[in-house]
Image (tube, rainbow, N blue to C red):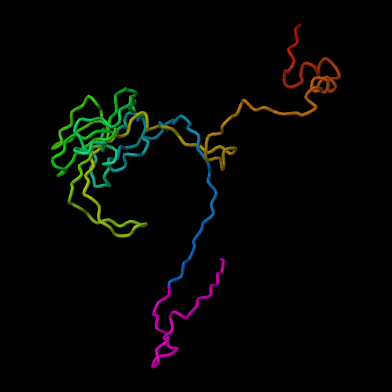
Amino acid sequence: MEIIKRKISLDSYTSRKKNTWGEMTATTFYVNVFFKQDMDDMGIGTDVDFTADTTTSTIMNPYTPDIRYVNKTLSDYFTPSLFITGYTRDKLDLVKSYSFTQAYQPGLNMSSELVEDYQGSQYTGVDRVVSNDNQMPITYVIGGDDSYTINPNNPDQNRGIFYKTYSGLTRPIVDSVVGNTNIPVTEMYYKGEGFNDTNTTLSAITKQEYLFGITTTPTVYSDVDIDRGVNSAFQSHLQMGEIKNMSDLINYGNGYYKIIK
């Protein structure tokens, strides 16, 4: 345990009035305490093919769907897509045009690019306004499918995030930087991809000793240029100086020299 001592000036907490001179006026003190924690990351794991124990029989429990049961395959753990809704901050700056008369123009793509979804299917992703009922609300999509028509009253898009921002309507939020404030009401609609073969694996996570503390996949730099200075001209002579017989020549540098027999 570490004991930290701090001195606090009581001048601002002491009365300077004539009748109460020198009396303590504060009932509480605020002291900033810095907490820190040191820990060692165990490192990345290695996926090993999962082999079920077939010597025992296990009854499927619907309340524990994440347990690995005998004869279960990877696809058994897949789940369908789920529609998610909620409140968030508006993203109007992504769909605002340069027009002075109509900044938010329905159908105008402010961003368009060819992208690929998690199944490998390509589509044109766009950022654009879907409808603008005098901004009550203004509806727009970020990363949506250019070929798909979204119903603002019943959004069911398969790609991208759909927003509804209401002008004049606000909701209170608590921000750690600016404090309590009000922001425009913005609804968010998103269709998640669920669990599938791109984000799910059925394997035993194994910790290998030489990977303890390694948190990322090692990067191999094969284009390393070593500057030997003035000794580079004598490199071949130095190598031959280490070779005493034919066996040394064959084994030098783990097959550095190509021996033609």
- 206 left or right of 146 in image: right
Q: Does the magenta stretch include residue 17?
A: yes
Q: Find the magenta span and give its range.
A: 1-29
Nearer-the-camera pick, 192 or 222:
222
* Residue 21 falls in image quadrant: bottom left
Could you tell me which residue is drawn at 47 percent across and 32 percent down? 47
Please state the horizontal and vertical placement of residue 125, each as a whole percent of the image: 29, 28
| Residue 191 visible in the picture | no
* Residue 244 falls in image quadrant: top right
- 48 left or right of 110 in image: right
Q: Does the magenta stretch include residue 191?
A: no
Q: Quadrant of the N terminus?
A: bottom right
Residue sticking out furthest to the top: 261
- 257 left or right of 74 in image: right
Reply above or below: 81 against 10: above
- 243 left or right of 186 in image: right
* Residue 68 falls in image quadrant: top left
The rendered magenta stretch, by its main secondary structure, is classed as loop
| Residue 219 visible in the picture | yes
Nearer-the-camera pick, 90 or 212:
90
Could you tell me which residue is drawn at 56 percent across and 43 percent down? 213
Please state the horizontal and vertical placement of residue 120, each as a whole percent of the image: 34, 23
Nearer-the-camera pick, 222 or 182:
182
